[in-house]
Amino acid sequence: MKILILAEHDGLQLSPSVRQAVTAAQFWNSPVHVLVAGHNADAVIQQAASIHGVERVIHANAAHLAHPLAEDIANLIVSISEGYEVILAAHSSFSKNALPRVAALLDVAMISDVLEIKAENTYVRSIYAGNVLTTIQSTDAVQLLTVHGSNFAAASLGANNEISSTVIASTEIVGSEIVSTETPAAFKKASWKSEVRSQSDRPALGSAKIVISGGRSLGSAESFEEVLSPLASKLGAALGATRAAVDAGFAPNDIQVGQTGVVVAPELYIAVGVSGAIQHTYGMKDSKIVVAINQDPDAPIFQVADYGLVADLFDVIPALTAAIR
Amino acid sequence: MNILVAVKRVVDYNIKVRIKPDGSDVDIDGVKMGINPFDENALEEALRLKEEGIATEVIAVSVGTSASQDVLRHSLAMGADRAILIESNADLQPLAVAKLLKSIVTREQPSLIILGKQAIDDDAGQTGQMLAALLDYPQGTFASALEIEGNEILVTREVDGGTETLTLALPAVITADLRLNEPRFVKLPNLMMARKKPIETINAAEFGVNLDARLKLIQVAEPAVRKAGIKVGSVEELINKLRTHNGILEGV
Ligand SMILES: Cc1cc2nc3c(=O)[nH]c(=O)nc-3n(C[C@H](O)[C@H](O)[C@H](O)COP(=O)(O)OP(=O)(O)OC[C@H]3O[C@@H](n4cnc5c(N)ncnc54)[C@H](O)[C@@H]3O)c2cc1C
Ligand SMILES: Nc1ncnc2c1ncn2[C@@H]1O[C@H](COP(=O)(O)O)[C@@H](O)[C@H]1O
């Protein structure tokens, strides 16, 4: 039995969530292989090979994988799937796009966003926007799943010397073997055109220690930035937003926290003018400490907040910013 | 050009579902149901393409028990031209639904198939991608904007860290994100009219596809609830409280 992890990366950097997927994969106590699909992504290969617990890095190198399409990733995984009983990835827009396609091609079910692995075919995941936890058992021969990254500690980095005897190509610091694989021909019916990456010098939302989220009540994109930015800078925090704030154009879509956005679990979550709809709290209720600032004492956000302050955010946030050195 | 839209009947998004006392399943008896929110966006987009003269017919399809007729009526009231119910009393999982939808696609030959990006009951987010794979069609998931140019569709997708745009050859499968559009309200007279429209019903068994559940439900449970904390009276008090937690305001 072998396990295949689909690695996410941007051509230069391996996504930190891959190390969380590696930890999840240790559950099966079987060899873990990581598939890196890209174009000239050599740096990523080295990063993947240096993760403890990775036996083999499979390298698929092709020009059309520079901006990989779900169709190409799925065809690639299917082409090498023989012998793998578990195929997994960290839950992200990349894996959510590609892995259900693999599931259909292999005729197996997929289990999305696994919170806990109970047994080799039994998982806990949440349904109904996090209101219910289900334990489900897969009856398929191949287990195909995405895991909720923040529930699994990141596997450590360093040489993996135990298996260095099988090294095919590696540098000194690397212990996992690196093998190349043939890439199936490009899927012709789709092509990548362009992308818009949100530019921000703030920490990444998914891994920030502190997250400050603003709601519709911020009123405009300008005031969202003016009110929340200085506090975020002082605290080294990432900014998040409610769907209402994103829909209104106050904040970019990729910082939406919740059922349809990003799920965060920082040390400190500060909800500013956020009502606390279940779709929003789904994305932040695993935060260690939650602070809510809302002028409505009955706002549901206070039910999940450790510290609530009933006040006007336009008074409180500048005061808070000033009070923190 | 025809557009097929998949609409699922789910528990209303405002409802906090409860579980049965024995933990065997969720208890949705008598709970308010409605069309999956993302499917409303899917349908709205199809209707707009028709209104722009790009599409000629919009077909709504739902898979489920006869109760799913209500979301098909809702779809007809919004403006769908036809409605098809694939009837089954089984609890069908995404792969089975995708196989049934594939059968309908094979019969109807739509140029565009739009689904929601996720059903808010199972939160799976899989059916569209599975359908695209079974059909060997290109897919544009989590779409926030669509533009049809001849035999191609430009899809703007919401992804981690921003957006990306793909070009897909038609026929293609799209899954709708909430920001794709603002669905129209259904007017009462339209709802009354929709009551009289026919709904074609096909028994799921007729398609001869394997509908077995691959995932067995073992139990359901309530997640640990966060305890509500305390209210503080001032910014100073808030900061003092935060300082009692080691490391949280470290260095500030
Ligand atoms: C299928 C579906 C998926 C969804 N997914 C998400 C998701 O992923 N993320 C998400 O966030 N939402 C999501 N939503 C939307 C969600 O239901 C709520 O509508 C949304 O979270 C509300 O955003 P809000 O708190 O900014 O706005 P509102 O609910 O309008 O709340 C504004 C709050 O600000 C307070 N306020 C106003 N002025 C001030 C002031 N001066 N000072 C202090 N407080 C003030 C008010 O008391 C109020 O509590 C989803 C909805 C659906 C149907
Ligand atoms: N039973 C169903 N009937 C019709 N459409 C469905 C059904 N189940 C899923 N879908 C479609 O597939 C999308 C994604 O569902 P899911 O993969 O279950 O999250 C939904 O938004 C619907 O468009």
Image: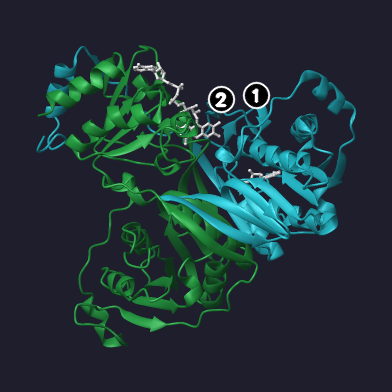
Q: Secondary structure at mark 1?
A: loop
Foreground: B46 or B224?
A: B46
Instruction: Left or right? Give the position of A253 relative to B110.
Output: left
Determine which residue is flagged by label 2: B15
Instruction: Left or right? Give the position of A87 relative to A223.
Output: right
* Crowdedness near tag 1: few (<14), some (14–19) or many (≥20) residues, C-alpha within 10 Å: few
Judging from the image, mark 1 belongs to the subunit labelled: B
Instruction: Left or right? Give the position of A253 relative to A158.
Output: right
Q: Which quadrant of the rendered structure holds the C terminus of chain B?
A: top left
Q: Colour of chain B?
A: cyan
Q: Quadrant of residue A59?
A: bottom left
Q: Which label sits on residue B32?
A: 1
Q: Which label sits on residue B43?
A: none
Q: Amino acid at mark 2?
A: Ile
Tell me if the residue at label 1 has its CB under 8 Å from ligand 1: no
Judging from the image, mark 2 belongs to the subunit labelled: B
The x, y position of residue A289, in whole percent, is: 25, 31
Q: Residue at x 56, y 46 (%)?
A: B217
Ligand 1 location (quadrant): top left
Tell me if the residue at label 2 has its CB under 8 Å from ligand 1: no
Q: Amino acid at mark 1?
A: Lys
In this rendering, the answer to whether A118 lies above or below A13 is above
Q: Residue at x 19, y 20 (%)?
A: A319
Q: Residue at x 79, y 47 (%)?
A: B55
The x, y position of residue A261, in whole percent, is: 45, 41
Foreground: A42 or A126?
A: A42
In this rendering, the answer to whether A276 lies above or below A63 is above
Q: Residue at x 38, y 48 (%)?
A: A198
**Chain letter, colour green:** A
